[in-house]
Structure formats: C-alpha cells, structure tokens
Amino acid sequence: FKIMLPMAIPGLTSVAILSAIGVWNDYFTIYMYAPSKVTVAVGLQGLVTQMEYKANYPLLFAVMIMSLIPVITVFSIFQKTIMENTTVGGVKG
C-alpha cells in the first residue's frame, strides 16, 4: 500500500470527480429509490414538460445555467487532474 496507493490516488480522484458529475446529472436512480425527492436534472425535466404549450424560455435557460454552474466549477477546479489521468494509452497530446 505504501507504493501502490500514492500512485493510484490521481486516477482514483479523476474517477471520483467524473462519477460525482454523473450522479449530479442522474435522472433515473432517484425515481427508483426516492421518488419524493428530486435532483436538479429531474426538476429541470419537470419544468420542460410543464412548458409544453406555453414556453417561458428565459426561465428555462436561467434554470439550465444555474444547474450547470456547480458542474463547471468542479470541472474547472479539478481540470488538471482530470485531463492528466484520463488519457488513452499510446496517444500523445
């Protein structure tokens, strides 16, 4: 563990960050386990289905931007870690 764990921490960090972003955007898991509680993505989907015939586009785009702010913030903070540790083997660049 003294050798393996320090070498695996950057990769595990990248996987954890990308998994957290995936959970943030999850639609279906919340329906299975806690249908009374909704995530931001489910709330946005509900807002879109309510506006089927009368479109309030300023409200829709404001909610979309507000839901993207945490994801963009997390990505910008950990950008270097994600980019360095999610490369395809043999590809330079």
Image (cartoon, grey):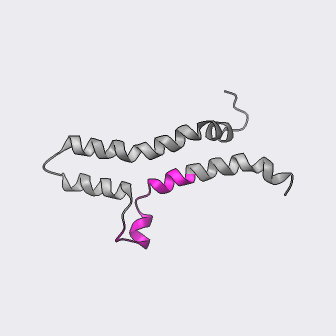
- Judge from the rendering whether residue 7 lies leftward or rightward of residue 23; answer left or right: right
Q: Residue lying at the far left in this picture: please name it.
A: 54
What is the number of callouts on the image? 0
- Judge from the rendering whether residue 47 lies leftward or rightward of residue 29; answer left or right: left
Could you tell me which residue is drawn at 22 percent across and 40 percent down?
Answer: 58
Could you tell me which residue is drawn at 52 percent across and 44 percent down?
Answer: 74
Could you tell me which residue is drawn at 76 percent across and 50 percent down?
Answer: 8
Estimate the x, y position of residue 10 in percent, counting from the top left: 71, 46
Within the image, what quadrant is residue 29 found in?
bottom left
Task: Check if residue 35 falls in the magenta segment.
Answer: yes
Estimate the x, y position of residue 26 in percent, counting from the top left: 44, 57
Estimate the x, y position of residue 62 in percent, counting from the top left: 28, 42
Estimate the x, y position of residue 9 in percent, counting from the top left: 73, 50
Q: Which residues are magenta?
A: 19-37
- Judge from the rendering whether residue 32 lies leftward or rightward of residue 19; answer left or right: left
Could you tell me which residue is drawn at 62 percent across and 41 percent down?
Answer: 82
Image: 29 above or below 88? below
Q: Can you say which quadrant of the picture contains the N terminus?
A: bottom right
Q: Nearer the viewer, residue 55 or 91?
A: 55
